[in-house]
Image: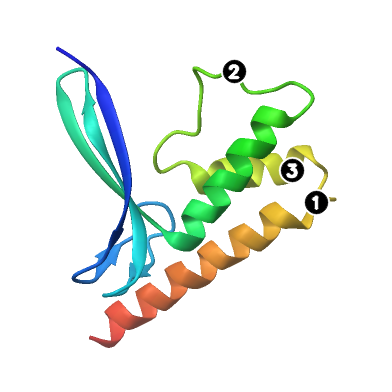
Amino acid sequence: MSDFVTQKSVKARKQHDCSECKGFIPTGERYMLISGASEGQGFSFKRCGACHHAFVWLDMTLRLGPYGMPPDEGIEFGALRAELAEYACESRFTDPEPLKHLHGMAERYTAAQNTKEAQ
């Protein structure tokens, strides 16, 4: 069985939930759709624009860092928050970028939860 992954930017025709921050992806907003198959199991993963920006930043930072993340490794789906927190801790919180992304993820999650509770 062949393993594969596809990634494309799509425009939301209806509201979705981001697989990373658990916030809403509103209708009309662009998001990254990652789908494929691994070990015979299909998967589909949605990442809002802000989380995708954070993912790209962290991926490039880890790959270009002094120890360099190997090309065959990467950030697991759904682990962006944990990876950002780990990077912030390892950098001794001197780099504001991961904290900015973590704060944005928390705000989107809280907004989505408040909306769900109000319904």
**Pair 1/3: label in front:** 1
Amino acid type, callout 3: Cys
Label 3's element? helix
Q: Earlier in the sequence, mark 1 or mark 3?
A: 3
Q: Residues within 10 Å of mark 2 (few under 14, many from 20)?
A: few
Q: Residues within 10 Å of mark 3 (few under 14, many from 20)?
A: some
Residue lying furthest top? 1
**Pair 2/3: label in front:** 2
Residue at the spot 46% in from the left edge and 70% down from the top edge: 108
Residue at the spot 64% in from the left edge and 46% down from the top edge: 85
Please state, as top left, top right, bottom left or bottom right, where the N terminus lies in the image: top left
Q: Quadrant of residue 69?
A: top right
Contact (CB < 8 A) between labels 1 and 3?
no
> At which x and y percent is residue 99?
69, 58
Rendered image coloring scheme = rainbow
Q: Which residue is mark 3?
A: 89
**Pair 2/1: label in front:** 2
Q: Earlier in the sequence, mark 2 or mark 3?
A: 2
Residue at the spot 57% in from the left edge and 66% down from the top edge: 104
Q: Which residue is mark 1?
A: 95
63 above or below 119?
above
For the residues labelled 2 and 3, the Cα–Cα distance comes to 21 Å
Please state, as top left, top right, bottom left or bottom right, where the C terminus lies in the image: bottom left
Q: Is residue 16 left or right of residue 20?
A: left
For the residues labelled 1 and 3, the Cα–Cα distance comes to 10 Å
Label 1's element? loop
Amino acid type, callout 2: Pro
Contact (CB < 8 A) between labels 2 and 1?
no
Q: Quadrant of residue 60?
A: top right
